[in-house]
């Protein structure tokens, strides 16, 4: 008990010191659709990170896109969320909204802009010319995603190049990204700070499952946007071929931001094979889906660092994932991985899930992905970027 009280006291002292050190820092955040409860990895990242940064004394102002959040500015756990008008276009929505966010920040005296993902990073030189320091979080090599055409991939590569050349600081969410960025001689500070996960504190009732006809322990789960790189059609086909229908169903939680042929394909395939589409799920319904699943599956072809997989692990679910490097960095047992696109291999892994334990202790694997530690590391990185510029100005 004395040791616990001592540790709590030391943590409170550290928190107070962090608040003092970061009290002068105000950051504007762009590149996300919005928070809270907006589908997407960047959005989940920001929803969990910025309230913690506020708790460390940083003022956080996040730009959101109209249509994803309420129309008027609001407060989310201390984060000021500012909705700006946004065009709804799969190709131009993100870059157009980020540009508007940067000009809005400049008009209101912003000194530090944090851009999320390499698409928004194409505006890094603009933000610099408007007098802001810029930090970019590199969430993944988006130009490797199947959904983008040649022009979009060229723009994304250009955004990555602009971040490397002009950003004052770069945060990489995985070792794979960090190695690639460092190999290209970035101009600013570079650090690895991963995505994180929150451990659940209670288990929602399985009564939430009734609306989808699911039973506790009787379904595999995937939570994902309907984009090509997630491999959802692969999963439906592998599950159908596994012979597990009736023994362990398949629940697919997610949807698309914009109507798409892939979305139509997934819905038609799910209907023909009997998979359950829950739509986009948040709150206790999503927690219940995780809590009562038999296992979690992520057959993706591309990831930055998969938050959905970390969330599944936080519920101690046995997991199956494709053996791309981003998924390997999470550190599942080797038998949990299969080669992306290999449906017989995936079907075998699903059978192994049913034959294996219902729960797996993931505590040790999740230690590097603690959001409180991630927030502290991010706050420290903000200080490094701000102090570097201050010292350079004094020296000049």
Image (cartoon, grey):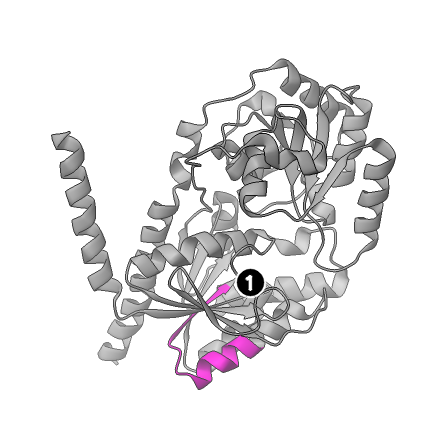
Label 1, secondary structure: give it.
Answer: loop
Q: Residues within 10 Å of mark 1 (few under 14, many from 20)?
A: many
The quadrant of the rendering that contains the C terminus is: bottom left
Q: Is residue 345 magenta?
A: no
Q: Please indicate, yes or no, whether residue 140 appears anywhere in the rendered image.
A: no
Vertically, is 390 above or below 203?
Answer: below
- How many marks do you count on the picture? 1
Quadrant housing residue 343 = top right
Of 379 and 326, which appears nearest the observer? 379
101 within the magenta span:
yes
Front residue of 96/6: it is: 6
Q: Residue furthest top?
A: 355
Q: Is residue 273 above or below residue 24?
A: above
Q: Looking at the picture, does residue 124 appear above or below residue 319?
A: below
Instruction: Using residue 384 as the reference point, say whether residue 329 is left or right of it.
Output: right
For the residue pair 275 and 387, the one nearer the viewer reads as 275
Residue 93, given in percent of the width and then of the height, sits at 66, 69
Q: Which residues are magenta?
A: 100-115
Q: 53 and 122: which one is in front? A: 53
Q: Which residue does the image show at 40% across and 28% down from the upper left? A: 364
Q: Say which residue appears at 47% left-offset and 55% top-offset.
A: 47
On the image, numbered disc 1 is attached to which residue? 32
Question: Which quadrant of the figure contains the N terminus?
Answer: top left
Q: Position of residue 247 (x, y in %)?
A: 73, 19
Q: Is residue 344 above or below residue 371?
A: above
* Residue 269 in sight in this render: yes
| Residue 246 coordinates in the image, percent (x, y) | 77, 21
Q: Residue at left 31%, top 57%?
A: 55
Residue for point 61% across, 71% down: 66
């Amino acid at each position: 008990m004395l040791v616990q009280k001592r540790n709590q006291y030391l943590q409170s002292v550290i928190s107070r010191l962090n608040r003092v050190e970061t009290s002068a820092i105000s950051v504007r955040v762009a590149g996300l659709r919005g928070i809270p409860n907006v589908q997407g990895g960047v959005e989940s990242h920001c929803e969990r990170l910025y309230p913690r940064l506020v708790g460390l004394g940083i003022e956080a102002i996040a730009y959101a896109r109209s249509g994803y959040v309420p129309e008027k500015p609001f407060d989310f756990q201390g984060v000021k969320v500012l909705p700006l008008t946004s065009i709804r276009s799969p190709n131009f929505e993100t870059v157009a909204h980020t540009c508007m966010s940067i000009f809005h920040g400049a008009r209101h005296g912003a000194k530090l802009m944090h851009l999320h993902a390499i698409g928004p990073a194409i505006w890094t030189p603009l933000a610099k010319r408007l007098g802001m320091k810029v930090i970019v979080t590199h969430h993944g090599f988006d130009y490797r995603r199947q959904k983008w055409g040649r022009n979009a991939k060229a723009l994304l590569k250009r955004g990555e190049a602009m971040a490397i050349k002009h950003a004052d600081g770069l945060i990489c969410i995985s070792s794979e990204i960090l190695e690639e960025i460092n190999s290209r001689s970035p101009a600013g500070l570079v650090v690895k700070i991963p995505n994180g996960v929150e451990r659940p504190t209670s288990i929602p009732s399985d009564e939430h499952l009734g609306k989808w006809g699911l039973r506790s322990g009787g379904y595999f789960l995937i939570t994902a946007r309907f984009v090509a790189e997630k491999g959802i059609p692969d999963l439906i086909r592998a599950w159908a071929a596994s012979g597990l229908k009736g023994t362990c169903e398949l629940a697919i939680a997610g949807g698309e931001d914009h109507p798409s042929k892939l979305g139509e394909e997934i819905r038609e395939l799910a209907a023909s094979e009997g998979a359950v589409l829950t739509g986009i799920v948040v709150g206790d319904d999503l927690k219940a889906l995780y809590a009562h699943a038999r296992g979690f599956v992520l057959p993706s072809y591309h990831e930055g660092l998969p938050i959905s997989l970390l969330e599944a692990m936080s519920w101690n679910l046995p997991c199956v994932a494709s053996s791309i490097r981003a998924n390997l960095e999470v550190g599942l047992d080797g038998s949990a991985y299969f080669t992306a696109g290999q449906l017989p291999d995936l079907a075998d892994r699903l059978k192994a899930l049913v034959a294996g334990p219902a729960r797996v202790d993931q505590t040790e694997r999740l230690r590097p992905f603690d959001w409180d530690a991630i927030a502290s590391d991010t706050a420290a990185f903000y200080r490094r970027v701000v102090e570097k510029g201050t010292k350079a100005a004094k020296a000049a």
